[in-house]
Image (tube, coloured by chain):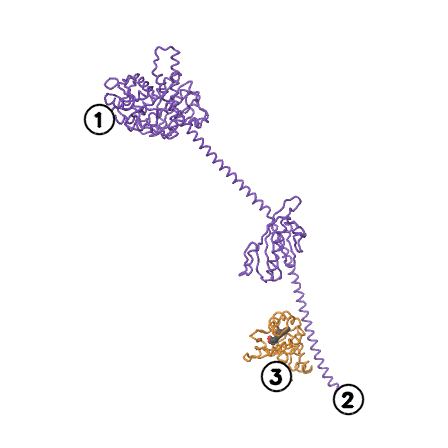
Chain colours: A orange, B purple
Amino acid sequence: MKGVIFSELIRWVEESYSPSVADQMIRQAQLPGNGSYTSVGTYPHVQALAMIGQLVEITGEPVNALAEAYGYWLSARFAELYPQFFVGFDDAITFLKAIDGIHQKEVTKLYPDALTPSVIAEVDGQDLLVSYASHRPFAEVAHGLIRGYIGHFGDDLVILRDETTPGPHAARFILQRK
Amino acid sequence: MDAAAAMIPEEVEAELALLRRRLARSEAARAEAEALLEVKSRVLAQANEQLKANREHLRIELGQRTRQLLEAQRVAGFGTMIWDAEAFKGEMSPHCQALLGLHGLAAIDGVMSVDGSHPMLDRVVPEERRKVFEFSKRLTIRALELKRSGVAGHKDTSHQVCTTEDCQTCAHMADCDRMLEFRIIGLSDGEPNRMIRALAETSFDEDLGRALVFITVQDITREIEAANEADALRQRDQRRMRELEQLAVELRAAREVAERANAAKTRFLAMMSHDIRTPMNGVIGMLELFDDAGLSESQHEMLQLMRSSGDQLRMLLDDIIDLEQAESGKLTLAAFPLEVGTFLGTSIGFWARAARNKGLTLQLERAAFGYDRPLVEWIVADRYRLRQIIDNLVSNAVKYTKRGGIVVRVGPVAENRFRFEVIDTGIGIPPERRAEIFVDFGQLHTVDVQAGGSGLGLAICRRIVDLMGGTIGVEAGPGGIGSCFWVELPFVEVDGPTAAKQKEEKRLRRFDGGRLRVLVAEDVETNRIVARGMLGKLGCDVDLVTNGEEAVEAVRNGQFDVVLMDMSMPVLDGPEATRRIKAIPGAVSRTPIIALTAYSGRAELAPMMTAGAIGVVKKPIVLEELYRAIRSVCH
Ligand code: HEM
């Protein structure tokens, strides 16, 4: 997984908790590179899981909530880091419908070795169904990202979770107008 | 203080350690990023190199392809132009520029207007500028329409059907004419105008997002010229054909007129001849009867001259009538048994005196002609016509030969075909005239009057020989001297009568020794007198009657050995009288009857022959013929 996800994770902890919590999380996770990540590098995603695991230890908060919070925070960072991907989009639904294309075309242009997840958004009557699937267990991060972009574009949408879809590797989100 | 000081450094220490670890992480990350960057840069530089190489390769490739394409255009004789319908900009291939006479003008732009000056329109002859302008306007609008409706893939092609499946546009395209032929001003001063054909294709290029008109341009001046030339040639040929046909029609018409005129002339001559015969009969007959005794030498000569003139006149009349009959298909043949040797001997012997008088020899020879069996004795033939041929050939030979002599050779050439040749030592006939001498006066320019004949004799001979299924011809005589006239005829052999050959005798007697009694039925007095005179010369007793009824009565009551019966007589004509005589009971009905006639055709003779006549004597009566006719029926 691309280094940007790791470096942003550390940055999120430093900003949301404190540099020392981040330092503690990194030291306790006993990472091979001692937590030095560059956004252009590529690292095993288990290191991210290890860090979040230590953050759960340190803060005592549930892992899902932490992952979702990280996703939410990350959505804004993406908007700062990659403003070019947001050109021409005025609402969350249109943006989410385009995200699979952005992942596959634009993200891989930037990071040729990126293996982005499958994020398919389709209109179902009044609703928008967003299905996430990945070999990595980041369904909660996805949740946070979606929530983030609804907020980013200021749409009046609520996110319901399709509970029948199992586990962190796959999830279905139903976006409804309030 | 110390504690605080000690405490502070402890907290600071921790803070510093944290910062140091963060710094270390950052530095490590930066080092890693830089290392990665270097790798990336190298890869990028390599890729860039590769890219440049690729681009260069493509550039060369493109150049080659373009040159090939342009070369192909030059060889094929067409140029291309691409017109951007929105930008009003066009590009012309070099050959296109050359064809239109716009050298160095690869790109043309600007809105076309008929009145204003435009480099391309200026090349078009003034009267066709509007046409070209309308054409390009139509195509421009068409291309823009295609873009507006977003019909990508569709191509309005001028020379092939659009291959896009279910193309929505094609339905509306039929009216759009995409080919234009127009004239441009000659390429150099004084050169005539040239003809250009433009084929256009409008399309909307989705990738470029452009409305395009693609035009091929071709110089078809020579093509048109060739077509025009071919057209002119065809028209000229047709005209000539019509002229020839017209000529043929005229010739046919002229020939028909000539043929009709010729036939009419011949008919007229025949009628005339016929009418002349009767008075001629009198003259010739009287001359024959005129007693030579007691005449002075000069009177005798005069008489001879009168006689031979009369003979010639008679022959001329006969020839004319014969020819008319031949031409009108009335000439027919009789079939009687004939003893070849005797017949030829007599026929040729007839000319012996004439030959002797000129100091010429005249011989009859038997010949083999490549067939070794001897000629048969008796055949079936038309004695009169055969004699006519021989008389003609032999008399000519005598006439045209001054020194030497005449040989007649006869013999078979095949089992049932015989040939006779009349060979003279005369002046001969040049090869180029040999064909024409057998042509009758209908086609001949001059008639040989000088030599004393009608000039028709050979023509009549040819007609007769044709009718008999034979051939006649002439070639040079042996050793190239004189002429050899030859005739080949088919024959049918018959058994001849066993009667011994009769001795030539001018005195006709009955077998019992007495004089023959002859009845002459003839309405014209001159003819009666001639007949009586001749029969008297032959030593016959003669009775004369003037019509058929009197003839029937005379036969019924008297004992006649032979009857000479004129065909056309008042009260009762020849055929009817003959029939009645044949109907009389008893031996008198078997009295032989000889027809006397001015006609010589079989058709005219038929009524007499069917009525029962068994011989014919032609008028004017010739002593020799009369003798032979009577002899053949009475003995
Ligand atoms: C412009 C917006 C976005 C950018 C630039 C972006 C970019 C990326 C990148 C670079 C990765 C790392 C992939 C790798 O290294 O293999 C990633 C992963 C991920 N993205 Fe996005 N992303 C965007 C929007 C979203 C949104 C809207 C979702 C919500 C569904 C999403 C869901 C994820 C998740 C869950 C992962 C984690 C990897 C995984 O699950 O396999 N991303 N993204």
Q: Nearer the viewer, residue A131 or B29?
A: A131
Q: CA distance from mark 3 to mark 1?
A: 170 Å
Q: Residue furthest left?
A: B586
Q: Nearer the viewer, residue B135 or B502?
A: B135
Residue A123 in the image: state x and y as whole percent.
57, 73
The image quadrant of residue B369 is: top left
- Tell whether label 2 touches label 1 (CB within 8 Å): no
Residue B212 in the image: state x and y as whole percent.
61, 58
Q: Which mark is residue B2?
A: 2
Q: CA distance from mark 1 to mark 2?
A: 206 Å
Q: Which mark is residue B585?
A: 1
Residue A171 in the image: state x and y as whole percent.
57, 77
Mark 1 closeness class: few <14, some 14–19, many ≥20 residues within 10 Å: few
The image quadrant of residue B269 is: top left
Residue under mark 1: which chain is it in? B
Residue B177 falls left or right of residue B591? right
The image quadrant of residue B559 is: top left
SS at mark 1? loop
Mark 3: amino acid: Pro
- Tell whether label 3 touches label 2 (CB within 8 Å): no
Q: Which mark is residue A62?
A: 3
Q: Nearer the viewer, residue A94 or B54?
A: A94
Q: Is residue B339 above or below residue A62?
A: above
Q: Is residue B382 visible?
A: yes
SS at mark 2? helix
Lower sequence index among marks 1 and 2: 2
Viewport quadrant of the N terminus of chain B: bottom right
Viewport quadrant of the C terminus of chain B: top left
Q: Nearer the viewer, mark 1 or mark 2?
A: 1
Q: Nearer the viewer, mark 3 or mark 1?
A: 1
Residue B598 falls left or right of residue B480? left
